[in-house]
């Protein structure tokens, strides 16, 4: 039986680990892998036992982008029928915090996958980029929209228009990644973030993620109003009362998600 292209595991309570498992192709995204990844995220999004997700790549690379063997002779209609944007949307719409653990190449679709994560932990070997223009294409997984929001117009234009790559140190300086560590520490650090987030009240965590993402598409006034309403909603949760009582009582809180 063929080995699964996506391996899902539960390394800690409340935490799911999703690993792209196509190391012989540097985890390049073919349609089978894309579909498996979307199906995995669809299931984890609906699983109340999962409070945080780590996504990583098997082997030396996170994801080297699209598998170009599926693009060489593809027509416009064939590509449209694949509806790749819908598969990406499942990941983008995941309500749980997603932490990307990046080593080696994160190019094209791999960089776009990292851009969809909420926290990016990268090793010193990590290389980011959107090289699509070099083969007569443009990004199709959100880079023209997410990359400028992540690192600003000037830096995004440089990467998108030239196809040049970004070493991990520069990616950190530009704000593309959250934390830079040695390669050997990437998975452990990413998992530590996930474990800490999973121990926090899930309603509050979900509200924070929704508000930050919505801030990318709304005015400041509209965003502040949304935040005020969400803040008020938190007073309907039992975790709010538990958290405050635990703090005042100088004891660890016991959050239940209620």
Image (tube, helix red, strand yellow):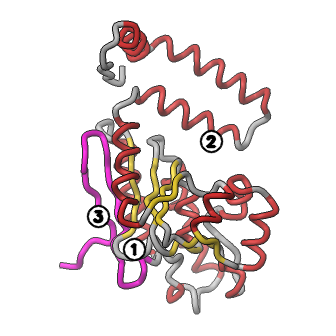
Q: Position of residue 45 (x, y in %)?
A: 40, 45
Mark 3 vs 1, N-terminal side: 3
Position of 162 with respect to 102 (left or right) is right
Q: Is disc 3 placed on a helix, strand or loop?
A: strand
Q: Nearer the viewer, residue 80 or 128?
A: 128
Using a 10 Å C-alpha cutoff, classify the residue at mark 3 as few (fewer than 14 neighbours), some (14 to 19) or many (20 or more): some
For the residue carrying disc 1, how many other residues have a C-alpha within 10 Å: few (<14), some (14-19), or many (20+)? Answer: few
- Image point (78%, 71%), residue name: 158
Residue at image point 39% right, 17% down: 239
What residue occupies the far left of the structure in this picture? 1
Residue that badge 1 annotates: 32
**x, y (%) of residue 34?**
45, 68
Q: Which residues are magenta?
A: 1-27
Above or below: residue 19 compared with residue 108: above
SS under mark 1: helix
Q: Is residue 113 magenta?
A: no
**Can residue 16 be found in the magenta stretch?**
yes
Which of label 1 and label 2 is nearer to you?
2
Q: Quadrant of the C terminus?
A: top left
Residue at the extreme right of the image, as rendered: 154
Tell which circle, 3 or 2, labels the residue nearer the N-terminal end.
3
Mark number, residue 213: 2
Query: Is disc 1 in contact with disc 2, using a CB cutoff of under 8 Å?
Result: no
x and y, in percent, of residue 124 in the image: 49, 68
Which sits earlier in the primary sequence, circle 1 or circle 2?
1
Q: Is residue 95 above or below residue 248?
A: below
Crowding near pointer 2: few (<14 within 10 Å), some, many (20+)?
few
* Residue position marked by numbered label 3 in the rendering: 7
Q: Is residue 164 left or right of residue 102?
A: right
């Amino acid at each position: 039986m063929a080995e699964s292209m996506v391996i899902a595991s539960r390394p800690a309570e409340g935490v799911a680990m999703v690993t792209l498992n196509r190391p012989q192709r540097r985890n390049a995204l073919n349609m089978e892998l894309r579909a498996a990844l979307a199906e995995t995220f669809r299931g984890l999004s609906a699983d109340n036992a999962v409070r945080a997700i780590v996504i990583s790549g098997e082997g030396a690379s996170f994801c080297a982008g699209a598998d170009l063997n599926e693009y060489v002779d593809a027509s416009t209609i064939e590509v449209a029928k694949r509806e790749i944007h819908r598969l990406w949307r499942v990941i983008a719409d995941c309500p749980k915090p997603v932490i990307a653990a990046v080593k080696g190449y994160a190019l094209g679709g791999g960089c776009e996958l990292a851009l969809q994560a909420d926290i990016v932990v990268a090793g010193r070997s990590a290389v980011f980029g959107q090289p699509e223009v070099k083969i007569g294409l443009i990004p199709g997984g959100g880079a023209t929209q997410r990359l400028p929001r992540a690192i600003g117009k000037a830096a995004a234009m440089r990467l998108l228009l030239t196809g040049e790559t970004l070493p991990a140190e520069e990616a950190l300086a530009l704000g593309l990644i959250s934390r830079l560590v040695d390669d050997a520490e990437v998975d452990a650090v990413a998992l530590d973030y996930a474990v800490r987030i999973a121990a926090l009240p899930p309603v509050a965590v979900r509200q924070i993620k929704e508000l930050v993402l919505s801030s990318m598409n709304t005015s400041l006034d509209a965003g502040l109003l949304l935040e005020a309403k969400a803040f008020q909603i938190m007073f309907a949760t039992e975790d709010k009362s538990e958290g405050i009582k635990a703090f005042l009582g100088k004891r660890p809180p016991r959050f239940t998600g209620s």
